[in-house]
Structures are given as structure tokens and as C-alpha cells.
Image (tube, rainbow, N blue to C red):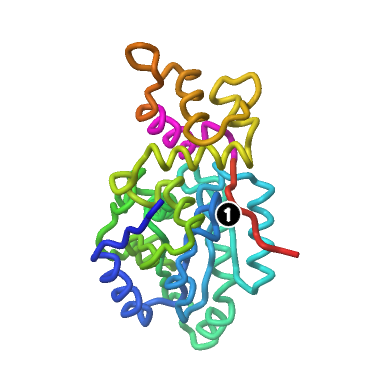
Amino acid sequence: MNINWYPGHMAKTMRVINESLKLVDAVCVLLDARVPQSSMNPGLTGLNKPLLFVLTRADLADSAVTKQWISYFKGQGISAIALDAKSGAGSERFLPAVKELLSEKLEARARKGQEGRAVRLMIVGIPNVGKSSLINRLSKRKSAKVEDRPGVTRGKQWIDVSADILLLDMPGVLQPRLEDESAALNLAFTGAIKDQVLDTEELSVKLIDTLAAIAPSALAGRCKFTALPEERGYELLQLAARSRGCVIRGGEPDTERFSALLLDEFRAGKMGNITLEKPNVS
């Protein structure tokens, strides 16, 4: 598939992010726990500030693999935590992780008698990675608009989380070119790229083949197969559509309707906790 989506406002967002670095003490980079590598925009992870990686959607990912990613990042010298911003599970780790990340700076401020000065954090990530949900969870109020689609936050905004924490929320931004097809597909599978710019049937064929390879039991169970058929690609999509009752007049499979259903169910975690990529460790 030819997947590339970099609207003009994303280029503007990267300029604003770089111009705003001088306003913050650290940068919190949100990654999707199901696809940590694919959701890592090099333009964001290369910012010249202390970084905290937050793996969101942890409730949808394989917890064992998420632990592997946390260990991997820490082995690279990068602070990392995992949480589910919507339910709040794991969010209690956020502030302690920030304080640990900035411990030297906070100690220096204390020596200067500046204990009351608020820590300022920039929140960045790809579209639809859960930035607004995290901010609302931390601030305990609906400060940022939340929708399960990319491109909702369009301008930077400061959010007062507590007396000593200020968050600078930035719109989601993808890397300019998605040259790695597997990474582009992972972002499309998880909803970081708008479905309107994609062929959802072709994308669903790719997804069903991916799930057949890495989570065959989950796919068979959701598609009501007694065992996963040997077919792959469009044939498997047709079989799954029939099995789930997505048919049109004459009994032909309605692959268009089933494709939308398959993507929705995967993104909602209805197939179980599935992580699409593991850290590359020896």
C-alpha cells in the first residue's frame, strides 16, 4: 500500500514544537504500546531536552511485551513507563517518573530556594496516541478534547495539572515520510492515519494476514472459525466476512462492511491484547 499522510499543519506543528522547547524543562513523548517503534517519530524523539517515553494504550497491548519495551528503552538510557490514559491504570507512575527524570534540576532549584517553581513539560506524539486522554486524567478535568480519531488537537495549549506541574499540549505529528511499509501499516492499523485517505479493504487484508501470523487463535475466535483456515489475503477476508454474517444479497461476502468492522474491533481491543512489534534485542 502507498501510505503517506503529512498535512501542512504537521510541518507547522514541528516548527512550533522546536520554537517552544525553550519554554519547557522536559519532553514527554507518547508512544502506542501496540506499536512502540512505528509510533516513534524521530523528529520528536530527537528533541534536545530530557525525554520521558510514555507507552499509552497499554490496556490493548500484550503486557509481557510492554515490559520488554520498557526494559529495552531503559537499557538505551531513556526513562519509560506504560499506562492506560482512559482508565487511569498506571497513571500514578507519571509524576514520580517526571521527578526522577528531572531530579538534578529540581535539587538545583531547591538549593536556590525555587522549590515552588512549576515543572513545565511538553506533551508530544503521533496523532490519536492518547495525549488528550492523558492530560485529562492527570488534570482530573476535561481540559483537552478527546476523540478516537487523529487530528483533533490543532493548537498548542498550556494545562495546569497541579501547583507544581504545567503541561504544554501539542497537536499530533507524524514523520514527513513513511518509507517503512510495515511501520506505515502499523500506524494505519492502530488509527494514527485517517481512514479517509486509505483503502480500508486493502488495509484490512494486510491486517487479517498480520493477525493470522502473530495471533491466529485470537483471529479465529473473533471470526468464529473452529480453526484458522489455510487461506490468506482477500480469500481469508471473504471467509471471515461470511462467518461474521457480513453478506449482501445472494450470499456474497460484504468485504467493505467487514473491513470497517475488523479495523474497529482490532483498535478497540476486542481481539484481545495484541502487540504488533517487539523490541529488537539479541
Task: Name the residue at 48% across, 84% down.
Answer: 113
Residue 227 placement, left or right of 18 = right
- Is 261 part of what is drawn in magenta? yes
Image height of 238 relative to 57, above or below: above
Task: Name the residue at 49% across, 63% down.
Answer: 40
In-front residue for pair 140/129: 129
Pick out the residue farthest to the bottom: 112
Q: Which residue is mark 1?
A: 82
Whether residue 146 is visible: no
Residue 62, horizontal then vertical, whole percent: 63, 44
In-front residue for pair 6/247: 247
Residue type indicated by callout 1? Ala
Residue 281, horizontal then vertical, whole percent: 71, 63
Residue 89, picture quadrant: top right
- Is 206 part of what is drawn in magenta? no
Q: Quadrant of the C terminus?
A: bottom right
In-front residue for pair 5/115: 5
Pick out the residue farthest to the top: 250
Task: Name the residue at 57% across, 50% down.
Answer: 90
Residue 151, picture quadrant: bottom left
Q: Main secondary structure of the magenta part?
A: helix
Residue 136, horizontal then vertical, whole percent: 38, 51
Q: Which residues are magenta?
A: 258-273
Task: Name the residue at 45% across, 45% down.
Answer: 189
